[in-house]
Amino acid sequence: MSETEDDRLIKALAHANYKTTIVQQRENLKLRYANALLHAHNGGIFTVNPSLLAMVDLLVRNEQTDAVLIDDKAIPIKIIDLPAFLDDIQSVYAEASNDYHVAWELLRKARNVNRAVNA
Amino acid sequence: MTTRGVLIHAHNNLEMDYALIALCNAFAIKSHLQVPICLVTDEGSLAWLRQQRGDLVDQAFDQIVVITVPIPSNRRFCDTRSTSRTLPWYNRTRSDSYALSPFEETLLIDADYLILDDTLNCVWGSDHDVMLNRHVIPLNHGTLSTHEKLLEATGIELCWATCVYFRKSEAAAILFDIIHHVREHYDYYAMIYGFAPQQYRNDYAFSIAVHMISGFIRCDDIATLPSPFLFTSFDCDELIDVPAKDDLTFLMNDPKEHWRFNLTRTKGVSVHVMNKFSLVRQADKLLELYV
């Protein structure tokens, strides 16, 4: 039996609801990820991102043990043990990104509103 | 003197159990921030809380400061778009937080700002004497209306008093002195800054004080909190379930198309839940999960 126009409209609206929910849940994940990337050190607050990781890695590779880095609030912060700081920010980044990946994959596989909300 | 801690003000009115909301939040805070919590309340609210929740009160709060019931203003409390009640609102004591706080470093938070992650632990030992947020992100991640960004349509930038970090310092003392002054002369400042004076709002008093302390210009001298926005569900949204720890399910009402509702679920993110009625409805579940 062929679908009526009403049936097609119901399906389209259900899909619209699904898309709205997926977009919403993705935004929630992005927010959680952004918070998980925050790292406090010596009175400063840093968002751990690839450029911070690359910068600190470069300094450590150049055998620098301390440096001044500018934090999220534009405050210069003295880092006295760069290798330890690099270890810390690497684990913050890895943990946050892994959590983000796991949650994202669950959401990606959700094919209806119920699964998207319960992913 | 304890060095670091959270300060919550909670004064019940005839229908809204603020102290119960603070109790639920205190257990959530303890599980994420692991710092002592001080409750500022009045005798009536505390007696009711002890009568209803018994030993949990001393388990949740490390210190309780009892003050006389402040002067209320009337506020319309909404429980989604379908129900609203005009009730007394005892919100004038937050400007006394500097003097009331037993901590050297204090996180002053609204009872209904549910702390469901450890992001705020980044504030301890910060270089800043005061931190507060100027931005909110609504639950639907959509755009905000002007009155959620500015004091009035042509007014100064709004600072949110929902979550404020301060360290006992000269700068913080001055800021709170100005907030106190604005509170005491609210009608005058309402006229100067161009808003209606009927209802005292802490957000307005904090915003004016920050504006004044910044030399009457827009200035980012007072830093934002580590996460520079407050994730906020407005009172037209409803908290419908708490499926697990740090996990909230909301039914969101579309701000433009009021007939539309969408489900959303937040995990591991702190949320300002403005629909306090729905928060009270979920209180038993929250306590079950966090105690």
Image: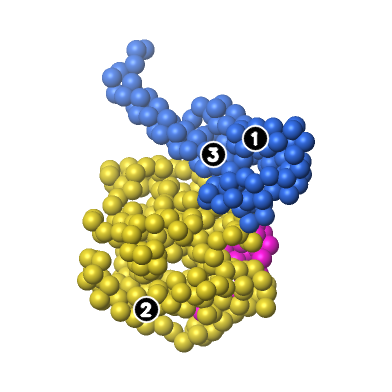
Does mark 1 fall on the same chain as mark 3?
Answer: yes
Relative placement, left or right, of B275 versus B152 is right
Q: Which chain is blue?
A: A
- Residue wearing tag 3: A29
Residue type, numbered disc 1: Met
Q: Position of residue B16 (x, y in %)?
A: 43, 71
Visible residue check, residue B126: yes
SS for callout 1:
helix
The quarter of the picture where the N terminus of chain B appears is bottom right
User: Residue at 46% of width from left, 87% of height from top?
Assistant: B68
Visible residue check, residue B117: no
Give the answer, above or below, for where B205 lies relative to A33: below
User: Residue at 40% of width from left, 60% of height from top?
Assistant: B159
User: Residue at 34% of width from left, 75% of height from top?
Assistant: B182
Residue type, numbered disc 2: His
Q: What residue span does the magenta drawing correspond to?
A: B25-41
